[in-house]
Amino acid sequence: MDDFLSLSADTARFTHGAPRALAFGDDGRLLWFLRSTGPVDALESLWVLDTATGTETLLADPRALSPEPGELPVTERRLRERTRLVAAGIGSYALSGDGRSAVFPLYGRLYRVTGDGAGGPAEIPAAGPALDPRPNADGSRTAYVADDALHVAPGGRISPDDGARWGVAEFAAAEELGRARGHWWSPDGVTLLAARVDESALQRRWFADPAHPELPAEDFAYPEAGGPNADVQLWVLGPDGGRVRLDWDAATHPYVSDAGWESPTEILLTVQDRLQRSVLLLSADPATGRTRELSATTHPQWVDPLVPGTPARLPDGRMLTAADTPGGAARGLALDGKPLTGDGIQVRRVAGIHEGRLLIEAGLRDPAEQQVLLLDPDTGAPTPLADGPGVHSVQASSGTLLLTSADADGFRRTVRTADGRAFVLRDLSAPLPYRVVPVLERVTEHGVPTALVLPRDHVPGRRLPVLMDSYGGPGFQDVSAEPRRWQARQWWADQGFAVVTVDNRGTPYVSPAFTHAMYRGFSEVTLEDQVAALRALGARHGDLDLGRVGVRGWSYGGYLAAMAVLRRPDVFHAAAAGAAPTDFRHYDTAYTERYLGLPQEHPEVYERDCLLPDAPQLTRPLLLVTGLADDNVHPSHTLRLSRALTDAGRPHQLLALPGVTHMTPGGTREKVMAQELAFFRRELAVS
């Protein structure tokens, strides 16, 4: 590999050494975070910063605790896949209710540490390889999952042995609904709310490593579109062995997308119908299990996922919820059902309350940027707190703020205390090799966001082959001012390409109406917008050679890449398609049915978006890539398309990667990029 690819691989795409998983504790006095020792150190340790003094303290070092680390338990490895966690060492932690202590798992063992570091980490005895530990309010007890059962330490198993999985999030919740946990302590630290997950009706999917035929295959339950889902219940488990089931119409609203204790006498939960057109916010009585409806949100297509930080009850008792503005122009907020924000603010997250006002992250101008605002809860009047160019985010506790700003010059994390002091949190990651300022433009009648990156040594008038590098699917924004995502694209540009990225309709943060335009139209809308945007940019930038266009992508981006050469060979001349979901009839329920409906009711939609019937039409070079341990987009998607192409006599290339998951960790992505570069240089005649 060349220098950039080696550096990207060694630094985990420039993330090793950067602080992450930041959380305030002890009323803002402590700032907890994970960070490795430098840019090529993959093992993250647990740190705390005392905001009263600015002093950082190392609380737990995985090298000291596990000098000879073993394999991650299978359940933790899969949870990390669901949450896109690639870090090694201490990958996650959870704070006690008072924020003065934390617990964390490490290779199946559990540890507790206090914020003052006294005595160092203490191991918590566990019943087996432990997953997702959660301490109670004062840190005196820890709930955790082992062998699909919920345990408490000190104590023991508290979930019944009834064949179900307890205390975990099912695949659909963790992968698609934004809920990665399955147990919650009551505020008094005595009682637990726990999910009971029955996956017995689901089909099993299997993995075998062909590079190691001596190893047994793995299997797991997978909810395939149109098929059965996990049966999810919520139970209150008392310290005396009492059990109360929360009662709602789970047959009508089977998905639990959010849950938690609002007070010792109230649980809030958000449930959705299967097609996610109806979302209910419910209040539950933990003593009886009875629920009552607080709000209902409906949409003829689908209700967008929750705005993080909502729903929430304000100190004065009013209920804060997410709500689209009339006409779908903006994702906003409502108090007790009354709209609080208008079309000019695209709300992305509610971070809390600061100085009596709502602290939010939102878009005010270009969707590539994000600002931090204070919002008056009575009038909706916004006051910018961080609104310069770039992507700004915030965390808050008791008047202390952590402001993170990201732009072409990198990342800056500043702590501002309630008494007016400010200091910078140390970042030990490698400096970004490129300062990239992509050309951002909104094109076509739909105002589609695009970005163009040219070689650093580009001479105007020199014609460049185009490399389309887009994701294109719902739920992810590609065209963003966040600087890390442009590093690899600048490298591609410096290899002799004009790199174009397009956020077609269906992607987030432009408007709800923009996002919903993809409803039952994955292939049609995605491809139409990508083609129209490419041609619009070609008309504006004469150096783009539209006679030589390559397209690459991963996951939905791989679907886009394969579809591009199969259906529009007049526009796209070569494609590298990684982890492509080639037939959504075999993808998961919560994601697929949200956008396409049920395959039994709309088979024509699924057939239209399936790539397998297009195999005989392939006339352009196509490189297919798949990880053989991918439990998100199973390798069978790629292998089925390869078989269809082979049966049709259509030449193509297949790169199958044993042991590689959907996240392509450990430098795999960079190794694949090197092979893609050789492919595109050859097929597009790049000198």
Image: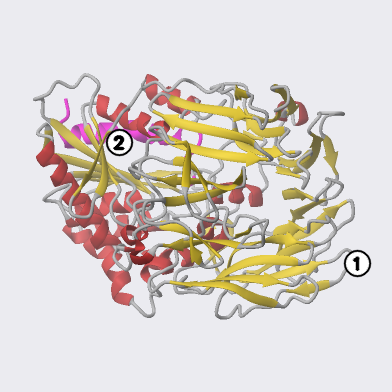
Q: In front: 224, or 87?
A: 87
The percent position of residue 233, horizontal first and vertical second, equals 67, 71
Residue name at image x 58 percent, y 70 percent:
271
Residue 393 lies, with reference to residue 607, above or below; the image says: above
Is residue 671 a member of the stretch shown in magenta? yes
Q: Which mark is residue 676?
A: 2
279 sits left or right of 24 in the view? left
For the residue marked with disc 2, what is the amino acid?
Glu
Is residue 210 a member of the stretch shown in magenta? no
The percent position of residue 178, horizontal first and vertical second, equals 55, 56
Specify the color scheme: secondary structure
The residue that disc 1 covers is: 240
Residue 220 position by quadrant: bottom right
Q: Nearer the viewer, mark 1 or mark 2?
A: 1
Q: In front: 28, or 432?
A: 28
Q: Residues within 10 Å of mark 2 (few under 14, many from 20)?
A: some
Q: Taking the image as drawn, is residue 647 in sight?
A: no
Residue interval drawn in magenta: 661-687
Residue name at image x 25 percent, y 49 percent:
448
Local secondary structure at mark 2: helix
